[in-house]
Amino acid sequence: MAAIASAGVRPGLVYFYSARSGACRRAEGFLAQVLQRRKNHGTFHLYRVDEEERPDLLERFGVDHVPTLVVVEDRFVKGRLESPRGCREIERFLAPWLQ
């Protein structure tokens, strides 16, 4: 997670999920589609955080439920989207960073 805190790098996109959740698997598929459109897969440093493996990070970022997307830029949380339900919702959320 040290790369997230470094200034001057691409923004970090932190995807908080549970491997056992169908909603998380769907959201991850939607996220992949959005990032592949217009070749935006290089826009972010993508970090996947499993709630069972890193509960400390969920607490640190104030994540109460998964799936949740958090954009970190210049060491600050710049955006948060809880329970994304589709590509359009994720694309609207990420629009300020997408090309």
Image: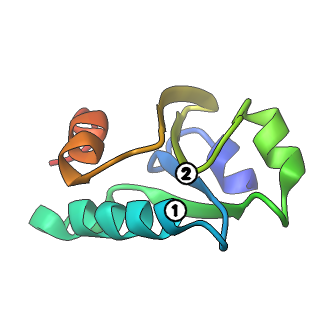
Depth check, front residue: 77 or 3:
77
Residue highlighted by disc 2: 67
Going by the numbered disc 2, the residue's amino acid type is Pro
Residue 36, label in figure: none
Q: Residues within 10 Å of mark 1 (few under 14, many from 20)?
A: many
Residue highlighted by disc 1: 24
Q: Mark 1 falls on what kind of element?
A: helix
Depth check, front residue: 22 or 45:
22
Q: Residues within 10 Å of mark 2 (few under 14, many from 20)?
A: many
How is the model colour-coded? rainbow
Judged left or right of residue 27, residue 63 is: right
Question: Sequence order check: which comes first, mark 1 or mark 2?
Answer: 1
Can residue 92 be seen in this snapshot?
A: yes
Tell me the CA gap for discs 1 and 2. 5 Å
Q: Do the numbered discs 1 and 2 sit on residues whose CB atoms are within 8 Å?
A: yes
Rendered residue at 66%/41% (across/down)? 65
Depth check, front residue: 68 or 97:
68
Rendered residue at 52%/49% (across/down)? 12
Rendered residue at 77%/43% (across/down)? 58
Going by the numbered disc 1, the residue's amino acid type is Cys
Q: Position of residue 41 (x, y in %)?
A: 30, 67
**Quadrant of res 28:** bottom left
Q: Mark 2 falls on what kind of element?
A: loop
Judged left or right of residue 83, residue 53 is: right
Q: Compared to 88, does 73 lie above or below? A: above
Q: Position of residue 17 (x, y in %)?
A: 62, 59
Judged left or right of residue 53, residue 19 is: left
Judged left or right of residue 15, residue 99 is: left
Q: Compared to 2, does 19 lie above or below? A: below
Rendered residue at 75%/53% (across/down)? 2
Q: Position of residue 85 (x, y in %)?
A: 33, 48
